[in-house]
Image: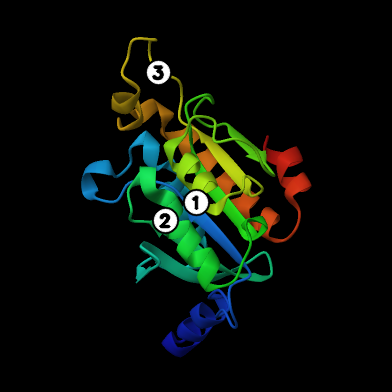
């Protein structure tokens, strides 16, 4: 195979270029900055990165107080979004994007960390409360709705009840948790594709 054939093959394997306006917004929650990379609270960011990696794109365009990427997923054009507002103000970024594209919360999927689930576990729901998660509180408050799909990514419970919650969610995953985390992030990316494609029940049956 010549070098030209290799380039042609790589070009043909690229994700199709998105056309038209986004029909769905996929948000991974986390905190910006190198000091927060790979922390438990950034599981949503990690899942968004897996989606981008699968499609051969980078989440780097600054828009809507976020790093964004235009992608095709589940047969639909989507905006992949990582808010740079810090977790507690995630709703600011989400609302800006929804309003700009005239989308409703029903066209939103949020991926985020959950200490109530073991590392490696997912919970997918069509709607629900914030569950005490500050990023979700912000989104629900500013959108005025809890009717959007969400993918909760297990990051494990605190080692003991007296352990400060902030310290726990801002801690990094242990080496022995790596394989389970990697599997969960891949499953979260696959679940997001099913949800965007209108198959949330299939996603719940497969990954919950």
**Alpha carbon separation for disc pair 1 and 3:** 29 Å
* Mark 2 Cα shell of 10 Å, populated few (<14), some (14-19), many (≥20): many
**Alpha carbon separation for disc pair 1 and 2:** 7 Å
Judged from the image, the secondary structure of the residue bearing numbered disc 3 is loop
Q: Find residue 198 and report its horizontal and vertical position in percent.
A: 75, 58
* Mark 3 Cα shell of 10 Å, populated few (<14), some (14-19), many (≥20): some
Residue 23: mark: none
Q: Which label sits in the foreground, 2 or 3?
A: 2
Q: Find residue 159 and report its horizontal and vertical position in percent.
A: 38, 14
Query: Mark 2 = which residue?
Result: 92
Task: Give the residue at x 60% y 56%.
Answer: 108
Query: Mark 3 = which residue?
Result: 158
Are discs 2 and 3 less than 8 Å apart at CB?
A: no
Residue 142: mark: 1
Are discs 1 and 2 less than 8 Å apart at CB?
A: yes
11 left or right of 158?
right
Where 122 falls versus 97 (above or below)? above
Total tally of numbered discs in the picture: 3
Task: Give the residue at x 53% y 40%.
Answer: 183
Task: Give the residue at x 56% y 75%.
Answer: 13
Q: Which mark is first along the chain, 3 or 2?
A: 2
């Amino acid at each position: 195979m010549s070098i030209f054939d290799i380039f042609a093959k790589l070009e043909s394997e690229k994700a199709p270029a998105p056309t038209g306006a986004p029909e769905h917004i996929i948000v991974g929650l986390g905190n910006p900055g190198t000091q927060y990379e790979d922390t438990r609270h950034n599981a949503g960011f990690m899942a968004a990165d897996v989606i981008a990696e699968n499609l051969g794109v980078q989440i780097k365009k600054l828009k809507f107080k976020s790093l964004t990427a235009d992608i095709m997923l589940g047969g639909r054009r989507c905006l992949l979004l990582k808010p740079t507002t810090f977790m507690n103000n995630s709703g600011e970024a989400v609302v800006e994007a929804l309003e700009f594209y005239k989308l409703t919360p029903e066209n939103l999927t949020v991926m985020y960390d959950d200490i109530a689930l073991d590392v490696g576990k997912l919970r997918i729901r069509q709607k629900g409360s914030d569950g005490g998660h500050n990023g979700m509180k912000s989104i629900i408050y500013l959108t005025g709705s809890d009717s959007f799909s969400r993918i909760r990514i297990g990051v494990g419970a605190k080692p003991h009840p007296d352990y400060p919650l902030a310290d726990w969610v801002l801690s990094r995953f242990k080496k022995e948790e790596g394989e389970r985390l990697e599997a969960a992030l891949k499953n979260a990316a696959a679940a997001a594709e099913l949800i965007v494609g209108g198959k949330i029940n299939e996603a719940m049956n497969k990954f919950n």
